[in-house]
Image: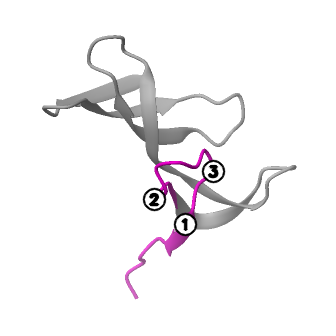
Amino acid sequence: MSKIIVDLEFANLVAESYDNGTPLNDIAVYLQDKTTGEVVQDIASVRQSIKNEETNEVIPKTVEFLVWTDKNSEDYTQKFRIEMHEEE
């Protein structure tokens, strides 16, 4: 696991890679309370795109961004998929 912490005046902005127990390791971006170190709010998750959440079947050469835009929701609100650019 590796972690990048950016000090904001009101919280820490953290980007952290982690092993979630599957072949699909994620990068999580979240706000962290500067005093307690607790996660205050999820911002985004970046991972290899998957076709099926239950089987973790992947979509080759594609990443997806899960974004939390509603501060009151624990579920992501938007998903973007980006295919890897390949030179022709």
- Asked if residue 77 is among those painted magenta in the image, a careful observer would answer yes
The mark closer to the camera, 2 or 1, is: 2
Mark 1: secondary structure: strand
Question: In the drawing, what numbered circle is on residue 69?
Answer: 2
* Front-most of residues 85 and 38: 38
**Quick one: label 3, few (<14), some, or many (20+) residues within 10 Å?**
few
- Asked if residue 67 is among those painted magenta in the image, a careful observer would answer yes
Alpha-carbon span between mark 2 and mark 3: 9 Å
Question: In the drawing, what numbered circle is on residue 29?
Answer: none
**Quick one: label 1, few (<14), some, or many (20+) residues within 10 Å?**
few
Mark 3: secondary structure: loop
Q: Circle 3 sits on which residue?
A: 75
Alpha-carbon span between mark 3 and mark 1: 9 Å
Mark 2: secondary structure: loop
Q: Circle 1 sits on which residue?
A: 78
Q: Is residue 37 above or below residue 72?
A: above
Give the main secondary structure, helix, strand or loop, of the magenta stretch: loop
What x and y, as percent, mark residue 79? 56, 66
- The C terminus, quarter of image: bottom left
Magenta stretch in the rendered image: 66-88
Q: Are marks 2 and 1 in contact (CB under 8 Å)?
A: yes
Left/right placement of residue 1 relative to residue 48 reads left
- What's the residue type where badge 2 is placed? Thr
Q: Are marks 2 and 3 in contact (CB under 8 Å)?
A: no
- What's the residue type where badge 3 is placed? Asp
